[in-house]
Amino acid sequence: MQAVMTGFLILLLAINSIMIFKLRDMKWTDTIRRLRNMAFGVAGIIVPEMVILLTKDRQIAYYAFTFFYIAFAWYTMMIFRFSVSYSGYRLFKVYKSPLFWITVMESAAFIWGIFSERFFTITHARWYEHIYWICRPFSMFYAYAIAGYITLTAAVVVLIIAATQSARIYRLKYSGVAIIIVVMVASRANSQLKQQPILMQVVCFALCEIVIVYMAVHYAPRKLNQRAMRFVADKLNDGIVLYDDEHRLQFVTAGYSHAVGLKGIQGIDNEKIYWDKVISEANVENAWDGKVMSVGRDDGIYYYEIQHMALSEDGKLIGTVYWIRNVTESIKNYGEMVHRANFDELTGIYNEAHFHEVTRKLLDENPDTEFVMTCSSVEKFRVFKELFGKEKYDDYLIRTAESLRTGLDHIPKCKYGRIGESDFYIMMPKEAFDPQQFLDAIDEVAKAYCTNNFNLVVKASVYEITEPLQDMLTICNKASMACETIKGDYGRRILWFDESILKESKLKERYNAELSKAIEHGEIQIYLQPQVDKSGKLIGAEALARWVHREDGLIPPAQFIPYFEKNGRITELDICIWRQACEKLKEWKEKGRDDLHISVNISARDLYAIDIYEHCVSLVKEYGIDARNLKLEITESAIINDLNQHVHLVEKLQAAGFEVEMDDFGSAYSSFNMLKDIYVDVLKIDMKFLGDTKNEVRSHAILKSIVDLSGELHMKTVAEGVETEEQLEFLKGVGCDIYQGYYFSKPMPVADFEAKYL
Ligand code: C2E
Ligand code: CA
Ligand code: CA
């Protein structure tokens, strides 16, 4: 029996040593240090007990007992110190501690008593069929024993105080240790009162020590971890479901039903197989990489991202976690973001970048299909916007997009998009393209926006994609290039791109490159077209630009002005023309002909590019001419573009003495309405626009009413484009003031003009 018990004690000693070793590796806090001291203390009581168990020699046994009691005194002290530290209280410095000195004194007393046997004696006694050494204490011994009980009780009290003062989850941490110490006290009291061998006490102490270390080092922190994890998990809005290795549901967060929104969804009660299935099926296109499932609920579609994690330890599965996050919001935002990046906000069809992307892909994927690219564009859409408002214009764009959808969505390999403010592009297989149908569809929409006064003109052009490897921008440009050449040519509304258009565009580019030099070298010149009054007397002229090109000869303005208007360089050219006009006026003035005026054209672009007022005022000042003689023609469409601002400009110019003419009055839309807001000196009516109308009676009526109205508003009228005698007679009949046109003379070089008229 003794041998068995000794073996057991050796085992306890071994465990204790391992603990000492392990504790050495831990973070060296005060509590850990004290735990380790305690473990040493336990070793100090196990070793003498082993000696007591094994020896037959009374003297050795007595020494061992003495050593045991000394070690026990120190061990009790260590328990107390550990309890204080564990509870978070601070002790006095060791040497100041009375407990320390008491223990020192006790130890000294026991050593002194070793020879005299003053405190206790030992005898052999039978206990459970076996003979053990047993201690028989004398009265002095009780003082020592009581001191030990007081110390241990104090430790328990400290721990209980800590337990009552701490949060619930920490209570067990303290009270658990307190209970263990109470067990130790009980076992000691029991063996002392019954005068039993100290063996049971030592075993009990060693076991309790193991439990204390476990509590302090593993249990309490882990408990805290678990609590914290649980706390976090429950606060999460996500659903976390945990299954054990047998696929049994172990844990589900409070956020689960919130996240999934369906109470008692199958997965909760069923095995984890449900989730495996969900995961294998879940994958929502356009979501990101993770597995996302969509669930249709009464209030819309919801998206969940599901993550699946297998928990394993040493290569063995110990459980499975499914993490279900409600990502509806993010996916919707993401979807919106993608949509915003790829689709035109107003019409919902492809925007430029995405149109280029999808058409590029289409071309690449169908190298054997012949495609066409069409472009359609509203002419003078700014005027349309000004006249009818942005809403109406937007409405037109939306209607066009709708008509594209209904007309094209069933055609395979067909893509369309809105590019820029007013252009729509379509790419489709050539064999599916029917030009007439295309025009009809455009007309159908445009028709709804035409009024008596305004014709919504939509130009359309087509480019047969002969070189599908060109980049999309070039392909689209070729389509739109054709569209641009349609300007003003109302009869031919659909134009096919061919190389001549490209040639033309290259020519324009050349002109653009040459413009500055041309101005410098005097290639840009004014031609003058006479203006006469009712009596046929010359009263002035309109200055019209000509490019006398050193290689290409005389180039009419139609070839370069629209192009420069588009790219903004018209201002450079206009300034050059204005200067030449001023120079002429100066010359004429010097010759005593300051009764003649010159009208110059101001382009819409000029109104934004420079300060017209400043410019004109300083010009007349510089040349010393009368502002009245430099008449300023601004087209009706330029004025209408930004009426409020231009009304102000016109007023300022008039105040400075200039006469402002509204050019091309009545050209494409009613301008009557505008007249209530703006006062100009002259309305210039182009016969060409009236001539367009088949019904002559009607156009005469319109002309007459314009002249009448202008008279009432104290404005003069100029009729330009007068080609025939009849026209002239009619104009005289209705009371038009000034005439200009081929009937009198074509625009001519200044020298010719002067020779003929001055
Ligand atoms: P616009 O200002 O309306 O000029 C009148 C145009 O009608 C001139 O064409 C003129 O030659 C032409 N014309 C005159 N009488 C008749 C006629 O009896 N019958 C016909 N069929 N046409 C006639 P042009 O000179 O070719 O100018 C065309 C347009 O180019 C001008 O129209 C004007 O918008 C623009 N333009 C010309 N010179 C300048 C300039 O210096 N600056 C700016 N910004 N634009 C200019
Ligand atoms: Ca003009
Ligand atoms: Ca005109």
Image: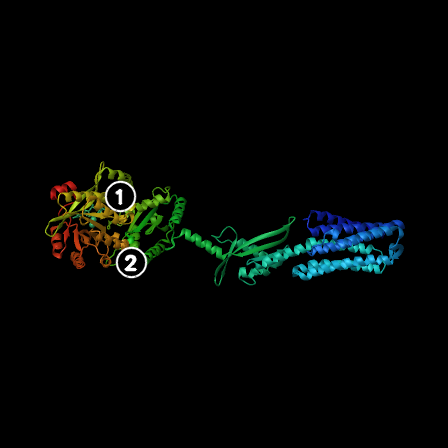
As measured in the structure, the alpha-carbon distance from the residue carrying label 2 to the one carrying label 1 is 32 Å
Q: Position of residue 24 (x, y in %)?
A: 71, 47
Q: Position of residue 51 (x, y in %)?
A: 84, 49
Numbered tag placed on residue 409 in the rendering: none
Q: Secondary structure at mark 2?
A: helix
Q: Which residue is mark 2?
A: 388
Q: Quadrant of residue 274?
A: bottom right
Q: Quadrant of residue 503?
A: top left
Residue 329 falls left or right of residue 103: left
Locate the C terminus and report the quarter of the image it occupies. top left
Residue 430 falls left or right of residue 320: left
Q: Secondary structure at mark 1?
A: helix
* Kind of residue sitting beneath label 2: Phe
Q: Is residue 456 visible?
A: no
* Kind of residue sitting beneath label 1: Glu
Q: Position of residue 739 (x, y in %)?
A: 14, 51
Q: Which residue is mark 1?
A: 572
Q: Which residue is at the front of the view, 381 or 157? A: 157
Q: Position of residue 219 (x, y in %)?
A: 68, 55
Residue that extends furthest to the top in the rendered view of this protein = 551
Disc 1 Cβ-to-ligand 1 distance below 8 Å? no
